[in-house]
Image: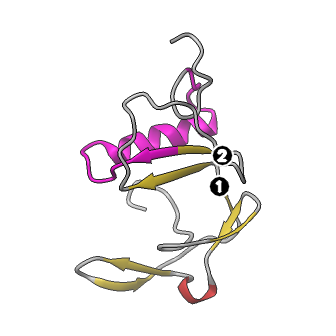
Amino acid sequence: MDAGFSLVADDRVVMRGVYASPPPQLAGLLEVRGVGILRTSFVTNARVILKVFLGEEGARLPMPERDPRTGVVVLRLNGAFPGDLNRIIAAFKACCGDYEWYAGAGGEGAGL
């Protein structure tokens, strides 16, 4: 959220096709480790364009991967490494069309 993204839900979402909404019991609640549970603004029916798995060791140049249910790009990152937030932002921008995928998670792998 500090990077400009909006909260849908903390920990889990309800998926309807490619749209995500918070479960009613979690709507607007955000756990900040070591601080507590805070209430904040949130969005519903957010169109999902990137699925990020944190806590996984992704390859330096990953093979293209799409979620089988939604078709969105899948990214696998540790989440604790320096620069991981920047990698997520770059992948999000590529999914939005700000960058063009050449190879990697959302690319076709051609040319390499």
Indicate the secondary structure of the residue bearing disc 2: loop
Splitting the image into 4 quarters, where does residue 97 fall? top right
- Residues in magenta? 75-102
Residue of label 1: 48
Label 2 – label 1 distance at C-alpha: 7 Å
- Say if the magenta span includes residue 88: yes
As shown in the figure, which amino acid type bears the numbered disc 2? Val
- Residue beneath the point at 39% across and 41% down: 58
The mark found on residue 72 in the picture is 2
Instruction: Tell whether position 65 is magenta.
Output: no
Image location of residue 31, percent across then percent down: 37, 79
Contact (Cβ within 8 Å) of mark 2 with mark 1:
yes
- Of tags 2 and 1, the one toward the viewer is 2
For the residue pair 54 and 9, the one nearer the viewer reads as 54
Mark nearer the N terminus (2 vs 1): 1
Question: Within 10 angstroms of label 1, few (less than 14), some, or many (20 or more) residues?
Answer: some
Quadrant assignment for the N terminus? bottom left
Q: Is residue 83 left or right of residue 27?
A: left
